[in-house]
Image: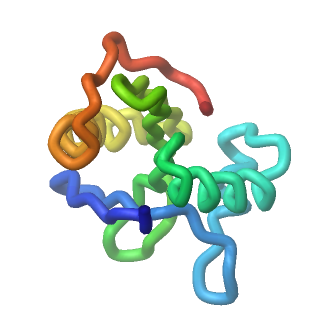
Amino acid sequence: MQPVEINAGTWYLRALRADERITDVPALSLLQVDDPTAYVAAAERDWESETRFVWAICIPTTGELIALIGLTSDGSSGRLWGEARDGYDEALDAAIGPVSRFAEGALDLAVEQPFSRGIG
């Protein structure tokens, strides 16, 4: 599957990027991701295999990653997880509903509760 962008009200969700136009590597470092470049590459592979779906939660006007949300699938159910940069918990909270609806509607996955903080 190709990454799907999601509108989450004030925020928008997009696939992680590390290219000449946009790089999420510095923001992922702020979220304590050990090897941000490898993390972006793994996220791309996981979208293709439909096992893990990771979105950058971004400021619409700049595209800056302020939080990360993901959905890990076992084929029939999904686990939501995420982490926000300091001061951006509201953006992460706003993304939970839209990503849950994507999981249920587009992927036919039952989303397990509760939401877990952290990087998956």
Question: Residue at image x 39%, y 33%?
Answer: 89
Q: Which residue reaches farthest front?
A: 75
Q: Quadrant of the C terminus?
A: top right
Horizontally, is 49 left or right of 116 in the view? right
Residue 14 visible in the current orientation: yes
Q: Which residue reaches farthest right?
A: 35
Q: Nearer the viewer, residue 99 or 48?
A: 48
Q: Nearer the viewer, residue 74 or 85?
A: 74
Q: Quadrant of the N terminus?
A: bottom left
Question: Residue at image x 68%, y 81%?
Answer: 19
The vertical placement of 90 against 46, above or below, is above
Question: Residue at image x 41%, y 28%?
Answer: 80
Q: Which residue reaches farthest bottom?
A: 20
Q: Which residue reaches farthest top?
A: 114
Q: Nearer the viewer, residue 12 or 71?
A: 71
Give percent across and percent down for residue 3: 42, 64
Residue 111: quarter of image:
top left
Give percent across and percent down for residue 117: 50, 21
Give percent across and percent down for residue 76: 35, 26
Please, which colouring scheme is shown? rainbow
Residue 67 visible in the current orientation: no
Question: Residue at image x 32%, y 64%?
Answer: 5
Horizontally, is 26 left or right of 56 in the view? right
The vertical placement of 90 against 117, above or below, is below
